[in-house]
Amino acid sequence: MLRMAQINHIKDLYENEDLSLREISRKTGHSFKTVQKYAYQSDWSEDNLPNSEPQGYPVLGDFIPMIDEWLEDDRKIPRKQRHTVWRIFCRLRDEHSFSGSYSSVKRYVRKRRFVMNSPNGGYLPLEHALGSGQVDFGEHIYYDGAGQQQNGYALTISFPNSNKGYTQTYPSQNQECLLEGMKRVFEHIGGVPPRLRFDNMSTAVVQVLRGTERVLTDGFIRFMLHYRFQAEFCNPASGNEKGNVENKVGYSRRNAFVPVPTIISFKDFNESLLEWCEKDAKRLHYKKKELIQKLWKDDEVNLLSLPEYPFPVFRYASLTVSKNGFATIETNKYGLSPALSGETVQAKIFFDHVEFFYDHRPVGNYPRSYKKGDEVYDWTQYVSVLCKKPGATLHTRFFRQMPQQWQSLLEQASGKERKNALQLLSEIVSDGNVSLCDDALELAGENGRTDVDSLRQCYYMIAKKEYRPNPMKFSASPALNYNPNLSAYDGLMGGDANVRAD
């Protein structure tokens, strides 16, 4: 399996240098099938470079602006649906009465593409191409559902040409939060900026090399390949290279986060942030004195198209379950079944939750904790174990997670009665009917019963459907006058001699 850097190189040769699959195979030393697999898997965007119109095309000259427009439009879509030289020639000939030769079209298109794909195609370092953006995080505070002050991190993507910006906030600056925020902005605006400028954040950059060279994380490379944008990174300690987004981060913090917000659901709060961003675009540009929303139209038409399928933002991790049934992610522990002690489980880590699997089966799903040294567990994971140790029930850390009425029942019960209650509770959990725990107790209480056998009957009445077979249906009406022939039984009675006369 190739490293992401090698895949990136193949895509660059295929997309930007316009090499054939066989040429790439010869140049990289990888097999044709390997090159074909990664070249077709997804696409790269190309630089939106300024026009460089060659001279010496007497017949083609009037058609060059049209060709340039087609090639610029091709930049926004996957390569498989871009113009070939032959297709450009046919369109010029059939739609615009072009009388020149195919070779002249081919010569110009090859030269034009070379200029477009050149990394030094004429841009100044701080020039802002239409549709291109800048990305940065900014720290702020917020109150959680319990009224406790927490630190949040607002991801902002700004567009220097129009000065429009979009902000999404998360509980961390990790890679899952970065990519999830970018994905949500892309989906909201209906396209992808062809180029994005970042600082050297560790969630994207593993190592800063000489000049503009960077070693990127695998997850960030996959995200780039999926959405086809080009990433540029600032020189170390050069914040002025993305000054627009740094100003936008401060502006958003002073306006969208004052007064200090209460965030119970990041999903809901981020929806409101997108609405705030759209309203904010109805003001005048600080320098151009036009509405930001009007200037945004020029950026919008230069966005790359969204991929056919969205990118699922998560990372995998293989974790060993401790003897107490915990799997550790960063500094936080997540409770799984003690039966998995010593086993290796797979974790899908999203920005807001974690899914655990063992032997391809789900074994846990928890909200992701961003605290330090936190323990996250679910009492339902431990009920079957408590059936063997009922005396430890009241002393477990998860006892107060149980439904309140069951806590009271288990506190009042002891010995065999508590064990029977735990066995019933374990049965309810294994049936997937945790929501019915209190209903069974309430029904029993209404009938003045508190013993476990009555509780079990009440649970069955609520959860188990009664079996009442449907009446039989006959295909035809039964005969009303049925006169069977019993003569076959005469032999059993000694023949005709034994037949009584009427």
Image: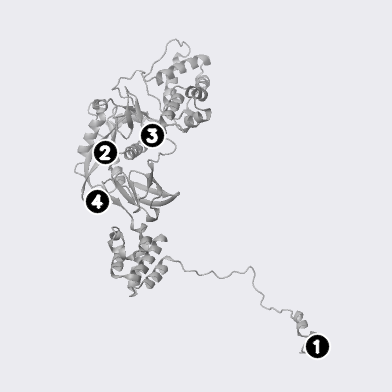
Question: Which residue is pictured at 53% across the width and 27% down the height?
Answer: 32
Is 23 placed above or below 475 here? above
**Label 1: element kind:** helix
The kind of residue on which mark 4 rests is Gly
Q: Which scheme is used to colour this image of the protein?
A: one colour
- Which type of secondary structure does the marked residue at label 4 adopt? loop
Name the residue carrying label 2: 154
Q: Residues within 10 Å of mark 4 (few under 14, many from 20)?
A: few
Mark sitting on residue 273? none
Residue 460 found in image quarter: bottom left
Residue 62 in view (yes/no): yes
Label 2 SS:
strand
Residue 117 in which image quadrant: top left
From the viewer's perspective, is 74 left or right of 243?
A: right
Q: Amino acid at mark 1?
A: Ala
Q: Residues within 10 Å of mark 1 (few under 14, many from 20)?
A: few
User: Which label's residue is closer to the chain start, 4 or 1?
Assistant: 4
| Residue linked to disc 4 | 145
Q: Earlier in the sequence, mark 2 or mark 4?
A: 4
- Spatial CA span between label 4 and label 1: 100 Å
Q: Which residue is mark 3?
A: 218
User: Looking at the image, is mark 1 or mark 3 earlier in the sequence?
Assistant: 3
x 40%, y 48%: residue: 345
The residue singled out by tag 1 in the image is: 497
Classify mark 3: helix, strand or loop. Answer: helix
Amino acid, disc 3: Asp
Q: Residue at point 32% right, 40% down?
A: 177
Mark found first going from the N terminus, 1 or 2: 2
